[in-house]
């Protein structure tokens, strides 16, 4: 089962694999962060806010529906305590 020529998959991957990308090697370690990272942080915060609002929406909707049902029951019912009839 072993191929004396080697693994054809490994040969193919060696041909198509790129070398080290320059953006990973050219920047010094102690260089300042780019201004884009601040923008990404701010948008990341808004993403978190949007995610939290989206996750809370079904609970808010359920609470409003329950309140609507409760008020409609309270408005339609006869809640007098006088039981003599």
Image (cartoon, rainbow, N blue to C red):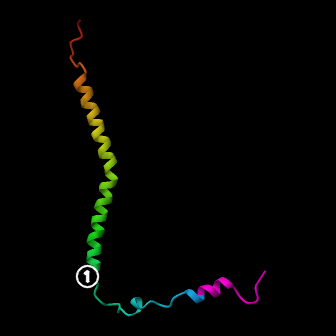
Residue 57 pos. (x, y %): 31, 50
The residue nearer to you, when weighing 14 against 24, is 14
Q: Residue 65, relative to residue 85: is it above or below?
A: below
Residue 34 pos. (x, y %): 28, 84
Q: For residue 3: magenta?
A: yes
Residue 28: which quarter of the image? bottom left
Q: In the current view of this chain or complex, which residue is farthest to the right?
A: 1
Locate the N terminus by quadrant. bottom right
Q: In the current view of this chain or complex, which residue is farthest to the top?
A: 85
Residue 21 in the figure: left or right of residue 84: right
For image coordinates 54% across by 87% down, the residue present is 17
What stretch of residues is rendered in magenta? 1-13
For image coordinates 27% across by 31% down, the residue present is 70
Locate the C terminus by quadrant. top left
Q: Residue 43, relative to residue 54: is it above or below?
A: below
Residue 8 pos. (x, y %): 68, 85
- The residue wearing badge 1 is 35
Q: For residue 76: magenta?
A: no
The residue nearer to you, when weighing 30 against 65, is 65
Residue 32 in the figure: left or right of residue 6: left
For image coordinates 28% across by 69% down, the residue present is 43
Residue 26 pos. (x, y %): 38, 93
């Amino acid at each position: 089962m072993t191929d004396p020529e080697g693994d054809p998959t490994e040969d193919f991957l060696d041909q198509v694999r790129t070398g080290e990308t320059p953006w990973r090697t050219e920047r010094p370690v102690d260089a300042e962060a780019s201004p884009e990272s601040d923008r990404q942080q701010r948008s990341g915060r808004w993403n978190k806010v949007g995610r939290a609002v989206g996750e809370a929406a079904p609970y808010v909707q359920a609470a409003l529906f329950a309140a609507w049902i409760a008020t409609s029951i309270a408005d339609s019912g006869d809640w007098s305590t006088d039981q003599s009839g």
